[in-house]
């Protein structure tokens, strides 16, 4: 039996598609810190592609290191991690022939390594291994195989060898090998677009209806724009959530003045509230938790232009005539204008 450990909506999406294509029933380990996870669980159950979905109490499995001394924290972290996870664990991982994990730097990923349980690693998001070091602020030495940091970790058996570098990571599935920042020895490609394209119309309809419940996403070519936001403040690219809001409002305002009908799709990690902006400029707002990839399963969701600052989410959209990256120079231009 296969088990998929899912910590985000995107994880569940890829898992569901794999189940449909392979015509298999999998078990899913679903974290309860996913927004509205109870309704998501019900919809996934209703697909008929899961033998059982086990809810994991991720909210109460977070590790706390009370010691300020870094050496002490390093020495006790494995013991604390095991204790923290097992306090809420409701599954025996040894019952499964194969375990699939999307994020091995999570508490549950560390637990698998602590218990020496092999797992297959899948990309946490599209082309994740091309940019993960920017989002998680890690040094290259923490995932480069011949760095002194990696040598010390392995020799002293301290810390965690994440991002697929653990000996317990059997292999690593990625969208594309080109440009990734981890060693290629365990990496193999499964292009996401090919995976999505293999679904027949029935499968696409099932996936779309599982995630886009009650959503109005229809548009049409010609003077229609979809904006993908990013958690700029959270990732320290701007100084505050207010500045982030104003930057995206400027983009909306510019295209509204050009006569575009606008749809806003917030990033799943974006915590800024855009309801005021949406009302002010009469935009359509798509639930941030809906994976943007499913827009391809609705032929009515067509856009003349897709815009982001740097988000590659716009690359995956099929029904788009033009894709435009504003770049960080747009942020700098905003700052100069408002300084």
Image: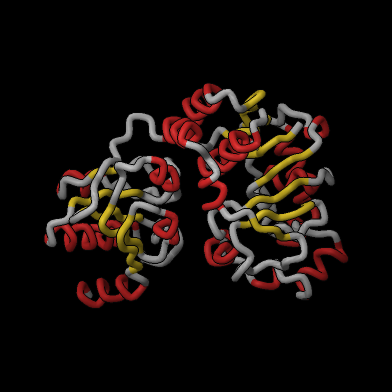
Image coords of residue 155 (percent x, y)? 87, 66
> In the depicted view, which residue is nearer to us: 156 or 216?
216
One can see residue 66 in this view: no
One can see residue 313 in this view: yes
Location of the C terminus by quadrant is bottom left
Q: Is residue 216 left or right of residue 232?
A: left
The image quadrant that residue 208 belongs to is top left
Q: Is residue 217 left or right of residue 201?
A: left
Image coords of residue 328 (percent x, y)? 36, 72
Residue at 77% across, 65% down: 185
Q: Is residue 152 above or below residue 74?
A: below
The image quadrant that residue 315 belongs to is bottom left
> In the depicted view, which residue is nearer to us: 325 or 229?
325
Residue at 40% across, 65% down: 310
Image coords of residue 147 (percent x, y)? 76, 75
Q: Is residue 332 left or right of residue 212?
A: left
Residue at 59% across, 34% down: 20
């Amino acid at each position: 039996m296969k088990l998929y450990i899912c910590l985000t909506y995107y994880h569940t999406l890829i898992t569901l598609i794999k189940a449909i294509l392979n015509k298999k029933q999998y078990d899913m380990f679903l974290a309860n810190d996913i927004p509205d996870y109870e309704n998501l669980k019900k919809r996934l159950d209703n697909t008929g592609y899961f033998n059982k979905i086990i809810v994991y109490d991720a909210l109460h499995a977070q590790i706390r290191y009370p010691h300020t001394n870094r050496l002490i924290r390093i020495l006790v972290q494995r013991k604390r991690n095991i204790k923290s996870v097992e306090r809420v664990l409701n599954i025996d991982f040894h019952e499964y022939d194969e375990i699939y994990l999307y994020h091995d730097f999570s508490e549950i990923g560390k637990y698998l390594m602590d218990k020496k349980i092999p797992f297959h690693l899948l990309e946490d998001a599209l082309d994740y291994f091309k940019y993960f070091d920017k989002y998680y602020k890690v040094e290259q030495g923490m995932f480069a195989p011949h760095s002194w940091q990696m040598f010390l970790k392995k020799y002293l058996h301290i810390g965690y060898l994440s991002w697929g570098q653990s000996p317990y990571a059997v292999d690593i599935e990625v969208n594309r090998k080109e440009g990734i920042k981890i060693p290629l020895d365990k990496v193999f490609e499964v292009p996401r677009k090919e995976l999505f394209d293999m679904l027949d119309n029935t499968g696409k309809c099932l996936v779309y209806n599982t995630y886009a419940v009650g959503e109005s996403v229809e548009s049409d070519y010609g003077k229609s724009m979809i904006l993908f936001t990013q958690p700029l403040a959270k990732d320290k690219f701007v100084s505050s959530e207010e500045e982030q809001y104003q930057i995206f409002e400027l983009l909306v305002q510019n295209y509204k003045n050009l006569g575009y009908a606008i749809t806003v799709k917030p990033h799943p990690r974006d915590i800024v509230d855009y309801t005021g902006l949406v009302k002010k400029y009469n935009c359509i707002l798509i639930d941030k938790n809906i994976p943007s990839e499913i827009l391809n399963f609705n032929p009515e969701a067509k856009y003349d232009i897709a815009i982001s600052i740097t988000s590659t989410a716009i690359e995956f959209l099929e029904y788009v005539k033009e894709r435009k990256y504003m770049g960080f120079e747009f942020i700098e231009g905003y700052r100069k204008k408002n300084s």
